[in-house]
Amino acid sequence: MLTEPTHELAVPTRVGHEHSGHVSQTASRDDVRSLAVPDLDPLAQFRLDGRVAIVTGASAGLGARFARVLDAAGARVVVTARRIERLEELATSLHDGLVVGCDLAERGAAGALVDAALDRYDRIDIVVNNAGVDHVEPAIEESLDDFRRELEVNLVAPFDLARRAAGAMVARDIAGSIVNVASIWGVVGVGQIPDAGYAASKGALVNLTRELAAQWARKGVRVNTLAPGWFHSEMTEERMFQDERSSRWMRQRTPMGRGGDEHELDGALLFLASHASSFVTGQVLIVDGGWTAV
């Protein structure tokens, strides 16, 4: 199901950097190496003017925040999730957004999403693989169907979207960036909150990132992982932050003594999505208040 916002917005002119020495944010993969700015404007490389980004799982929480951040940095954003009414509400706050309602775990959904983005904008520069599900249950009791569902949504769907988007980037000679959103579960065990399927899928997503980065590096497509710790989100709010026992356990275990606020992922996301990280690929950027450091 494809819909576009029906509202009319006055789109402000994007503030660009047109003086000598600046390279367009839609530069080809060979141009990215010449993005050095003679008059030293280090913030310029974080801009996303003219670029097109896909954000999955954008109907709420961190995904919605990611879409707004990329939009604020200048990107045209394709937002996708199953709850289309929430996407349409989100789109009213975007300058040039496209709403695509779909379940990426369904066969053919990733291809339809990529086609919709190309039909509208004729390019894809950024993919943020944020959609995910969890299933908290001791491993001995978890059914294979529940385990498979987590792998399907958290691992297979991101792979399908990444490979299709990367194909479009390579065909258009675009210096693209794919950001897979994993979790601290992807690098350490948690145990006290049992979810083997989530841990397995996020751990696999981390190493999938490395493999895709290695395969696509010379094609101009970078692949990195953003791994959040305990952040306020739709998935964690009731279970972690509103439950005093769980919240106390999290605060005691985290060196910074608290969970993260959603804006504290903005900088990490922009770094990985933009040309600011043009020599970074196959890496895991963990934003967790020190959780995995101890």
Image (cartoon, grey):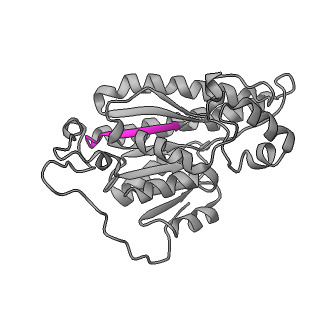
**Residue 232 % position (x, y):** 68, 48
| Quadrant location, the C terminus | top right
Magenta stretch: includes residue 178: yes
Residue 116 visible in the shown view: no
**Residue 253 % position (x, y):** 73, 29
What residue appears at the point 29 percent right and 45 percent down from the top-left corner?
42
What residue appears at the point 45 percent right and 27 percent down from the top-left corner?
283
Q: Is the residue 38 above or below the residue 142 in the image? A: below
Magenta stretch bounds = 172-180
Q: Is the residue 38 above or below the residue 159 in the image? A: below
255 vs 192, left or right, is left
**Of residues 240 and 131, the one drawn nearer to the viewer in this rendering:** 240
Magenta stretch: includes residue 39: no
**Residue 201 % position (x, y):** 64, 29
29 vs 253, left or right, is left
**Residue 55 % position (x, y):** 51, 50
**Of residues 93 and 140, the one drawn nearer to the viewer in this rendering:** 93
**Of residues 271 and 71, the one drawn nearer to the viewer in this rendering:** 271
Q: Is the residue 35 above or below the residue 2 in the image? A: above
| Quadrant location, the N terminus | bottom right
